[in-house]
Amino acid sequence: MRVTFILNSFPRLPIGGYRVVYEYSNKLAESGHSVSVVHCRSVGGLPKPRGMRAVRTRLAYFYRSMAKPRPAWQRTDPRVRFFFVPEPVERSIPDGDAVFATSWALSDYVLGYGRKKGKKCYLFQHYETWSGPKDKVDYAWKAPFNKVVISKWLLEVGKALGAGNMTYIPNGIDHERFRVKTPVEGREKVVSMMLSRQAWKGTDCGLRALEIAKSLVPDMKAVLFGVESPNLRLPGWMRFHRDPAQGFLASGIYNRSSCFLWPSLFEGFSLPPAEAMACGCAAVTTDCGGIRDFAEHMVSALISEPGRPEGLAENLIKCLRNDDLRKRIADAGIRNISGFTWEKSAALMERFLLETV
């Protein structure tokens, strides 16, 4: 079968949603399918770069279209074909049996393709009102796509919007990389957290929760990471790693942390806390939607209301002060997340494609 995924841009730095597409591409290629991933220089409806950034974007696109590079931060199967196009208009898209939109801004393009491009599908990884007008985001949900949603929360979002033709396929985890290498017992009071400049990721809330917890648990330390350096001065007890390699993230950060703090306001699935749980961290998180697929309060995670640093801090302090609770939460998290594998997800995706096409 010939399957095409279309992405808004080429990701120089790690992006969770893009990683999901690459993982599906790898698994489908391993199963003998012909897979193409199309990256776009520009997409109508999305902000266009200006000034020197626009020049750099054009030069980068020209290089990629000539050299056909692959993302340095993600393994990709050599059988997956990469395309770099100025805009995802029909003539720039390879013929196939199924073609996936992956953002609201790609909806009109894909809906306008002729039959040669394949059955029109959409991989919904978020309710994307953070990146576009609500009416256009909702239009994509209601449009006549064959829809895949990555969490039960998104399934409920779709139902509330009146969307039909939805198939639930949760994300997988790379358990060869994200696994326990340091025993859960005896870990120091180190809390890891991802930093992001996107407001809906809740970084300010998370930092405030860390400060509250530090005032009551003085020997606590924090290890932060993110694809971009934070625009603020961090205290000495917080260490920051910029764009860590996936191997170091698993071994050098998650496996050396007793807890992982996740302050996001809403998430389609939440890969970082899932990967941290697989590495033995006790997850202290907000009820951000997608987390519900693999985390249950006081069973496999400690969960609080989004946007409330006091709630996050209270749960974090509980975990740091009660080692039996931390170990119980961490062990349950390991068991829960072990059922989420890319092999299972890819098998469900292949079944979806066979039934759709």
Image: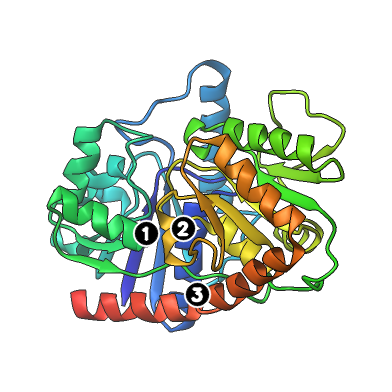
Q: Are marks 2 and 3 in contact (CB under 8 Å)?
A: no
Amino acid, disc 1: Phe
Q: Nearer the viewer, residue 214 or 82?
A: 214
Disc 2 and disc 1: Cα gap in Å?
25 Å
Q: Is residue 2 above or below residue 275?
A: below
Q: CA distance from mark 1 to mark 3?
A: 22 Å
For the residues labelled 1 and 3, say whether their Cβ atoms are less than 8 Å apart.
Answer: no
Earlier residue among tags 2 and 1: 1
Circle nearer the N terminus (2, 3): 2
In the rendering, at what x and y percent does residue 111 appear? 17, 50
- Identity of the residue drawn at 78% across and 44% down: 222
Residue 311 in the figure: left or right of residue 190: left
- Is residue 116 rendered to the left or right of residue 235? left
| Residue on which the image places disc 1 | 5
Task: Look at the picture and state if 96 lies above or below 257.
Answer: below
Q: Disc 3 on helix, strand or loop?
A: loop
Which one is nearer the viewer's eye here, 164 or 256? 256
**Could you say where residue 105 lies in the image, as x and y percent from the top left?**
29, 40
Q: Is residue 316 left or right of residue 265?
A: right
Taking 46 as reference, is 283 left or right? right
The amino acid on which the numbered mark 2 sits, given as a three-letter code, is: Ile
Q: Are marks 2 and 1 in contact (CB under 8 Å)?
A: no
Residue picked out by circle 2? 291
Q: Name the image quarter holding residue 263.
A: top right
**Closer to the observer: label 1 or label 3?**
3
Task: Name the mark nearer the viewer: 2 or 3.
Answer: 2
**How far is mark 2 from mark 3, CA to CA?**
13 Å
Image-quadrant location for residue 237: top right
Mark 1 or mark 3, earlier in chain: 1
What's the mark number on residue 340? 3
